[in-house]
Image (cartoon, grey):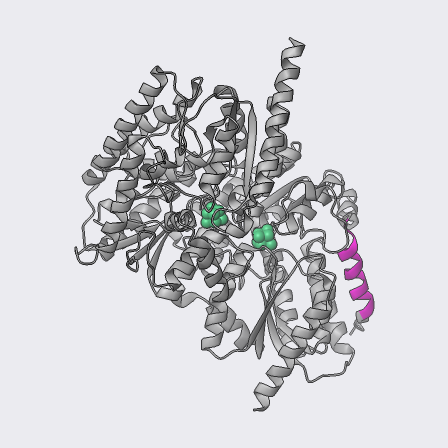
C-alpha cells in the first residue's frame, strides 16, 4: 500500500492552476508533443468526449475571477451585463487565451450566445462554434437534432486535427470521462459525508483543476485528494449543511466560498462546473457513441436554469433531490448580478423550497466582489437560524 | 421582448397626427384585447405566445384567442403603467437585474391582469413557448406557469450560430411542430388540425408581407415618407402580433402601402405626432428596441432635429421579410420553421452587423445609432462591438444611447438628448469633411 500524498501540496497545486490565468498548464501540455491542440469552452456543458477523442485538450474558461483588472473588456460591455463575458474578452485580448486553438460557446444564455459571434469577429483565425443543445427531450426529435449537432462538431474537430474521429476513439474517450465523472461523484459524496474533512474551498479548487488538466490526470488528482483529505483529521464543527445554487456560470470569488464556510455553513452540494457532473451516470462505452451521448444528455443529465423544465411539477425536483442526497438543511442562492437565467429561476425554486419547508437565503455576487462582510453576515445569520430551526 | 406596435396613449387627443392606417391599427389592437377579454364567453381557448417566431397562422387553425405578453408590457409602458408593475414584481421576489418586460407582465398579472385597455385578460389555456432569439422567454413562461398553473408547450428554435439555417435546424423545428406543438394545440383546443386552413392563412400572410416590405423600403426615397423606427412600430403591429394571416391585416397593409406610395409621389416626409416632418436633415439607422415609457418624447428629440430613422433592426424582430423571406403556403410547416429561425435576434452577431451595414448603404444613411436596452441581453450583449464594426466597415459615425423598454427609471431625457445632439453634430462635421475632400 502506498501512503497517500498529503493534502496541502495537492490543494496548493490546484490553487496554482486556478491562479494561472496564462494557462501555462495548457501550454505545457501542448508543448509535450508536436501538433497538440487545445479547445476552450464556456459554461455549462459541452461534450468534452469529442474534444478528447480528437486528441485535444478541452479547457474550461470561467472568466477572470477577481485576479485581473478588466480594462479592455469594459469597452465591450455595458454596465448592466454580467462580468464573465467582459473578463473573458479581457483574457483573450491580453493574449492569455492564445494557446487555445478554438472556443466552444454552449447554449446557456443570450450573453454567451452573442459572445460566440463576438469571438468570430475578433479572433478570425480561431475555430469558433456555438454549440446548441436541445430543449426537447424526445429521442426522435431533440435527440436527432442533438446527434446531428454532435456529428457536426465531431466533423469540425476531425478536420482541425486532420483525420476524422472514429467511433472507437470516441468510445475510449467516453470511458475516460465516465471514470472522471465517477471520481468527481466520489468527491461530492465524500464531502457530503464529511464536509469538515473536505471543505468546499478545497473541493472547488480540485474541480477547477479539471478545467485545465487532461481528464486522466484530473481523475487521479481527485482520488488523491479524497485519500489525502481523509488521512488528515480535521475538527468537526456544528455547521449548517447547505446546498449552493445559482453559481453555474460566472464564478464567485474563492473568498466568497471561504466566507460562507467561515460563517458556519458546510456546502454539501453546489452547481459549480456542472460540466463535470452534467451527465448523471455512466455513458455506454460501446456501440454508437453519439447516440449514447445524446441519450445521456436527454434522459440522465443535471438540471439548471438554462434547461427547460417540461412540466411545472418538474421545477425544483433536481434541487430537492440534491438536498436529500446530501443531507442538506438549507439552500443558499448565490447568483451573479445581471444573470437572467439564475435570477429568474430563483423565485420558482424559492417557492418550491418554501412549500417543502426548506430554509433558504439569497444574495448576488460578481466574480470580483471584494466586500465579503455582508455575505459573511448573511450566511452566518442563515446558519444560526438553521441551527435554531433544527433545535426547535 | 421587444415587440411591437400600437398607438401611444394620448392617441385620441386631437392634436396628434396620424396616417389613416395608424388609426386602423389602433382599432385592430384594441379589438384584439376585446376579443381576448371575451374569449371565454365566446367559447374560445386562449393561447399566449411571444412576438419573435410567433405561430399566429397555426394558432388560428385551432381558434385560439391570442395574447402576446410583450405587447401587453409595451402597451402598459406607453400608458405609463409599467413602472408600478415592475415594482410590484420586484416586491414579489423578482430581481431588479432581470428583463423588465418579464416583470411588467408579471406585475400586471399580480394586479388582477387588467389589460392595457382596462378589460381583464383571461388566464391562458396554453403558453406556446417558441423561444426565438432570447433565452429569457423560456424563464418568462416558466414563471407564469409556475404561478398560474397554465400548461406550456415548447418549440425550441435553434440559434443561427454559424450565420445560416442548417437543414438539421429546420428539420428539428418541423418535427417539433408536427409531433409536439400541433398535437398539444389539438388537445387543448379540441379542434382538429387542418393543413389547408393553415395554407389559407399563409396566403394572406404573404400578401401582407409583400406590402409591409414595400412600406419599409419606401424609406430608401429622399425624403423618406416614413420613420422606419418610431413610425414603423405602428406598421409592424398587426403583422407581428395576432393579425398575421387575417384578411384584416392584408387590408391594413394594402391601405398603408397606398398611403405611403402617395406620400412618395407627393415628395412628403414622415408623419409625426406633431404633424408632417419638415426638412429631412439626417438619415439614421437604429439598432435596438425603443423606449416605451417616454416614446413620444424620445421620438420628438429626433424629429425636432430633422432626423429620420430610415430603417431599424427592431422592425425585424417579428420577422425579417426585406431580404425575401415569405411564408410559403406550399410548404407551410417548413416555412413556419424558417420564419422562426430567421427572426432578427436569432441571427448571430456577424449577420446582424452585415445587415446593418447593408442598410446604411441601401438606405443612404448618415450613420448608426444604437439604443441599448438595459433589460435585454438578447439585443444588448455585444452591441458595443456592433457599433465599432459598423463604423469600421462603413466609415459612417455610430453612437450609443442607453434606455430601457418599460422601466421609467432608466429613461433620462437629458442624457439621451445630449447624446443625440452631439451625435448629430458629429454627423454634420463628417459630412462637411467629406464634402471638403471632394
Ligand atoms: S452569468 Fe448568467 S447571464 Fe452571465 S453569461 Fe453566465 S448565464 Fe449568462
Ligand atoms: S431579454 Fe429582450 S428579447 Fe428577451 S424577453 Fe426581455 S426584452 Fe424580450
Residue B303 seen in the figure? yes
Residue B365 drawn above or below residue B165: above
- Residue A174 in the magenta stretch? The answer is no
Residue B190: name its quadrant. Answer: bottom left
In screen coordinates, is A2 left or right of B377?
right
Number of callouts in the render? 0
Magenta-drawn stretch, dominant element (helix, strand or loop):
helix
Is residue A16 highlighted in magenta?
A: yes
Q: Which residues are magenta?
A: A8-21
- Say whether residue A309 is left or right of residue A56: left
Residue A192 lies, with reference to residue B270, above or below; the image says below
- Outermost residue on the front side: it is B15
| Image position of B431 (left or right of B162) | right
Say left or right for B414 vs B344: right
Residue at horizontal 46%, vertical 69%?
A317
Position of the N terminus of chain A, as image quadrant, is bottom right
The answer to whether residue A200 is visible is no
The C terminus of chain A: image quadrant: bottom right
Relative to the observer, which residue lies in front, A323 or B404?
B404
**Could you say where residue A262 lies in the image, as x and y percent from the top left?**
73, 75
Furthest-bottom residue in view?
A: A392
Q: For the point 52% across and 47% down, which residue is it?
A: B404
Residue at the image point whose x is 45% and y is 39% from the top: B296
Amino acid at each position: 500500500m502506498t501512503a497517500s500524498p498529503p493534502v496541502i501540496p495537492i490543494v496548493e497545486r490546484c490553487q496554482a492552476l486556478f491562479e494561472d490565468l496564462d494557462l501555462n498548464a495548457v501550454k505545457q501540455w501542448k508543448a509535450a508533443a508536436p501538433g497538440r491542440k487545445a479547445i476552450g469552452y464556456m459554461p455549462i456543458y459541452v461534450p468534452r468526449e469529442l474534444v478528447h477523442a480528437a486528441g485535444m485538450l478541452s479547457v474550461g474558461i470561467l472568466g477572470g475571477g477577481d485576479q485581473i483588472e478588466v480594462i479592455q473588456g469594459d469597452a465591450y460591455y455595458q454596465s448592466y451585463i454580467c462580468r464573465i463575458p467582459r473578463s473573458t474578452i479581457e483574457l483573450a485580448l491580453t493574449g492569455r487565451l492564445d494557446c487555445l486553438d478554438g472556443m466552444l460557446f454552449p447554449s446557456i444564455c443570450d450573453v454567451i450566445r452573442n459572445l460566440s459571434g463576438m469571438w468570430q469577429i475578433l479572433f478570425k483565425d480561431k475555430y469558433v462554434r456555438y454549440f446548441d443543445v436541445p430543449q426537447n427531450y424526445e429521442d426522435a426529435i431533440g435527440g436527432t437534432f442533438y446527434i446531428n449537432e454532435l456529428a457536426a462538431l465531431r466533423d469540425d474537430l476531425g478536420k482541425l486535427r486532420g483525420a476524422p474521429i472514429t467511433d472507437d476513439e470516441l468510445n475510449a474517450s467516453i470511458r475516460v470521462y465516465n471514470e472522471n465523472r465517477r471520481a468527481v461523484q466520489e468527491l461530492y459524496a465524500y464531502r457530503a459525508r464529511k464536509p469538515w474533512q473536505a471543505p468546499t474551498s478545497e473541493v472547488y479548487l480540485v474541480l477547477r483543476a479539471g478545467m485545465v488538466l487532461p481528464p486522466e490526470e484530473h481523475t487521479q488528482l481527485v482520488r488523491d485528494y479524497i485519500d489525502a483529505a481523509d488521512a488528515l483529521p480535521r475538527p468537526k464543527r456544528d455547521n449548517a449543511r447547505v446546498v449552493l445554487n445559482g453559481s453555474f456560470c460566472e464564478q464567485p470569488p474563492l473568498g466568497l466560498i471561504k466566507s460562507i464556510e467561515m460563517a458556519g455553513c458546510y456546502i454539501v452540494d453546489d452547481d459549480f462546473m456542472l460540466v463535470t457532473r452534467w451527465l448523471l451516470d455512466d455513458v455506454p462505452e460501446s456501440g454508437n457513441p453519439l447516440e449514447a451521448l445524446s441519450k445521456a444528455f436527454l434522459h440522465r443529465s443535471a438540471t439548471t436554469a438554462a434547461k427547460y423544465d417540461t412540466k411545472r411539477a418538474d421545477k425544483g425536483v433536481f434541487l430537492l433531490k440534491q438536498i436529500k442526497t446530501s443531507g442538506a438543511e438549507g439552500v443558499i442562492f448565490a447568483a451573479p448580478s445581471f444573470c437572467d437565467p439564475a435570477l429568474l429561476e430563483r423565485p420558482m425554486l424559492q417557492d418550491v423550497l418554501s412549500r417543502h419547508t426548506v430554509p433558504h437565503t439569497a444574495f448576488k455576487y460578481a466574480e470580483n466582489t471584494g466586500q465579503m462582510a455582508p455575505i459573511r453576515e448573511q450566511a452566518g445569520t442563515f446558519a444560526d437560524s438553521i441551527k435554531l430551526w433544527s433545535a426547535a | 421582448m421587444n415587440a411591437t406596435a400600437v398607438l401611444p396613449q394620448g392617441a385620441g387627443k386631437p392634436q396628434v397626427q396620424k396616417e389613416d392606417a395608424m388609426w386602423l391599427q389602433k382599432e385592430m389592437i384594441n379589438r384584439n384585447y376585446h376579443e381576448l377579454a371575451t374569449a371565454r364567453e365566446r367559447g374560445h381557448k386562449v393561447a399566449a405566445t411571444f412576438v419573435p417566431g410567433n405561430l399566429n397562422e397555426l394558432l388560428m387553425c385551432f381558434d385560439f384567442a391570442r395574447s402576446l405578453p410583450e405587447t401587453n408590457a409595451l402597451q402598459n409602458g406607453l400608458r405609463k403603467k409599467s413602472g408600478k408593475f415592475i415594482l410590484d414584481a420586484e416586491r414579489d421576489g423578482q430581481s431588479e437585474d432581470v428583463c423588465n418586460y418579464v416583470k411588467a407582465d408579471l406585475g400586471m398579472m399580480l394586479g388582477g391582469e387588467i389589460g392595457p385597455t382596462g378589460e381583464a385578460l383571461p388566464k391562458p389555456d396554453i403558453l406556446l413557448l417558441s423561444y426565438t432569439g432570447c433565452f429569457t422567454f423560456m424563464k418568462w413562461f416558466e414563471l407564469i406557469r409556475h404561478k398560474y398553473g397554465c400548461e406550456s408547450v415548447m418549440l425550441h428554435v435553434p440559434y443561427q450560430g454559424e450565420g445560416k439555417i442548417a437543414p438539421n435546424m429546420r428539420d428539428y423545428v418541423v418535427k417539433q411542430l408536427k409531433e409536439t406543438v400541433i398535437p398539444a394545440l389539438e388537445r387543448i383546443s379540441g379542434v382538429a388540425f387542418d393543413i389547408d386552413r393553415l395554407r389559407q392563412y399563409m396566403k394572406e400572410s404573404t400578401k401582407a408581407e409583400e406590402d409591409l416590405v414595400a412600406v419599409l423600403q419606401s424609406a430608401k426615397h429622399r425624403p423618406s415618407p416614413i420613420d422606419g423606427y418610431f413610425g414603423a412600430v405602428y406598421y409592424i403591429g398587426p403583422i407581428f402580433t395576432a393579425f398575421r394571416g387575417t384578411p384584416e391585416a392584408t387590408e391594413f397593409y394594402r391601405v398603408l402601402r397606398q398611403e405611403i406610395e402617395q406620400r412618395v409621389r407627393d415628395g412628403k416626409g414622415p408623419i409625426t405626432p406633431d404633424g408632417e416632418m419638415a426638412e429631412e436633415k439626417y438619415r439614421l439607422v437604429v439598432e435596438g428596441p425603443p423606449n416605451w415609457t417616454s416614446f413620444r418624447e424620445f421620438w420628438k428629440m429626433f424629429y425636432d432635429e430633422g432626423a429620420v430613422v430610415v430603417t431599424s433592426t427592431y422592425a425585424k424582430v417579428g420577422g425579417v421579410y426585406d431580404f425575401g423571406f415569405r411564408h410559403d403556403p406550399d410548404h407551410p410547416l417548413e416555412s413556419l420553421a424558417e420564419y422562426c429561425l430567421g427572426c432578427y435576434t436569432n441571427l448571430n452577431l456577424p449577420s446582424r452587423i452585415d445587415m446593418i451595414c447593408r442598410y446604411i448603404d441601401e438606405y443612404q444613411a448618415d450613420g448608426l445609432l444604437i439604443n441599448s436596452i438595459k433589460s435585454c441581453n438578447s439585443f444588448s450583449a455585444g452591441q458595443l462591438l456592433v457599433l465599432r464594426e459598423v463604423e469600421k466597415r462603413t466609415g459612417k459615425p455610430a453612437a450609443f444611447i442607453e434606455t430601457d423598454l418599460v422601466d421609467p427609471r432608466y429613461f433620462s431625457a437629458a442624457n439621451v438628448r445630449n447624446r443625440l445632439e452631439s451625435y448629430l453634430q458629429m454627423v454634420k462635421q463628417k459630412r462637411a469633411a467629406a464634402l471638403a475632400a471632394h
